[in-house]
Structures are given as C-alpha cells and as structure tokens.
Amino acid sequence: IFDHTSTEAKQAYIETTTGATSARIVRNQFLMSTAQDQQSGASSAFYSSADNAYIASNIIQGGYRGMQGEYDGAYIVGNLVSGSYSSLFVSGSSNYTFTIVNNTFDGESSSVFGLSTSGTSTEIAVINNIFTNITTAILQGGTVTIGDSTNLFYNNTDNDSGFTINANSILTDPQFISSTDRRLRATSPAFNTGLNGYLCADVRGRACYPDRRNIGGYVNTSGDPAATRTAR
C-alpha cells in the first residue's frame, strides 16, 4: 500500500492477509479522530498479520492504536505517530522478531502507551526512536525480550514498565521545531547520535545518509530551513 491518504473520522484500517509472506506499507498518511475518542472503537491506522512486513515513512495522527499486529520479521522504520492512545502495539508467538528503528512517537500528552507488547518468546529491537509526551513510553508485556539502544525519551510519566531502558538512552528535550513540527533543530541531541547498521527510512521518504544517523524519524535534513540542518 503506497501513497495513500485517509481523513476518515473514525477508521482508517488496513489489514493484510493472515499467512501472507510479506507486506509493504509505505508513505501513507492517516488522520483520525482523537486518541481518547477512540478507546472504545479501537480504531487503528492499520493492522498487519503478514510476516516480513516493511512499514516505513507513514504519518499517523490520532486514533486508538497507530499501528498494531503480529508481524514476524517486521521492520517498522521512519514513521511518525502522534496523538494515538497507543502508538504501536505488537504481539508475537514463539521466536518472532521485530525491528523498530528511527521512528518518532509523540503522545501530545494524550497517549497512554508509545510501544506496548505482548506474546511469548518474542524478541524486539528498539533502536534510534524518539518517545515524547506519553504516559508509559515502552510497556513490556508477556514473555517478550526488548533490546533497546540509543533511544530518546522526554516528558513521559514513565519511560519503561516491565523492563529497564538502556543506560545509553538520551533523557532530554529532542528540540522539535514546534509541538506540531517534529523535525529537529540544529542543536538537537538527536542529531548524528543514532546507531548505523540498520535499514533506514525517513518520514518524508527521503534517502538516508550512508555515514551518519539521527535519532527519530527525520533522518535527512537536506533542503530544510537552516534551523533544522547540521553540518556533515
């Protein structure tokens, strides 16, 4: 599913076929009603049960869950989720793996969970993400192993529940341009401090720099206003 825009007030829902071997959900925009309005309706931008899913460069605003599903071998990268009751919910069975890298999750002070998990014997890598303005940034549920590194947490009631975030986490203001523009200012602690070695995608679908990596979903600042650029 590519380049789709939905402004449905209640639902913007995509489901991939159970048992599918791959899915690509790229460059879509979902504008849904507020997180609190959707708790009973349980709306999601999309639900995927396909293995080896590639979910990249999507912008999701509002709704009950921004993204949810059971995706073994999934890569969730370069997405912006804001104002959802739960930004991302993943569950898996034995030996499932997920990679969640370079996303920006901003709760707008209405989100209860950034990333929440359930399942058994599931391994989740959480790398180079920004979690801001959320009640619980990462909730580990079930018998899930979370391996996290170089994430940024700011203004959350709790950064972690069920496990302890990595000591290399950054716990300071990411310096967004504004409360509605999550690009990074040139003085942001998220500039050039992310880990390389993972698949990369930018919120806007821009190419990633081969030699450096920001934290969060905005990894390519080429052509942005001077306030958002940094020297290479």
Image (tube, rainbow, N blue to C red):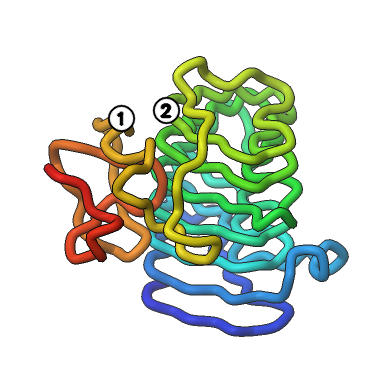
Q: Is residue 197 left or right of residue 127?
A: left
Label 1, residues with CA under 10 Å away: few <14, some 14-19, many ≥20: some
Query: Which element type, helix, strand or loop, lies under badge 2?
Result: loop
Horizontal and vertical percent position of residue 230 = 21, 47
- Dividing the image into 4 quarters, which one contains the N terminus? bottom left
Q: Earlier in the sequence, mark 2 or mark 1?
A: 2
- Residue 195's mark? 1
User: Which residue is at the far right?
Assistant: 40
Image: 183 above or below 99: below
Image: 84 above or below 72: below
Horizontal and vertical percent position of residue 187 = 33, 43
Q: Residue at x 33, y 65 (%)?
A: 204
Q: Residue at x 70, y 67 (%)?
A: 63
Q: Residue at x 56, y 42 (%)?
A: 131
The type of residue carrying mark 2 is Thr
Q: Nearer the viewer, residue 57 or 96?
A: 57
Pointer 2 residue: 150
Image: 17 above or below 158: below
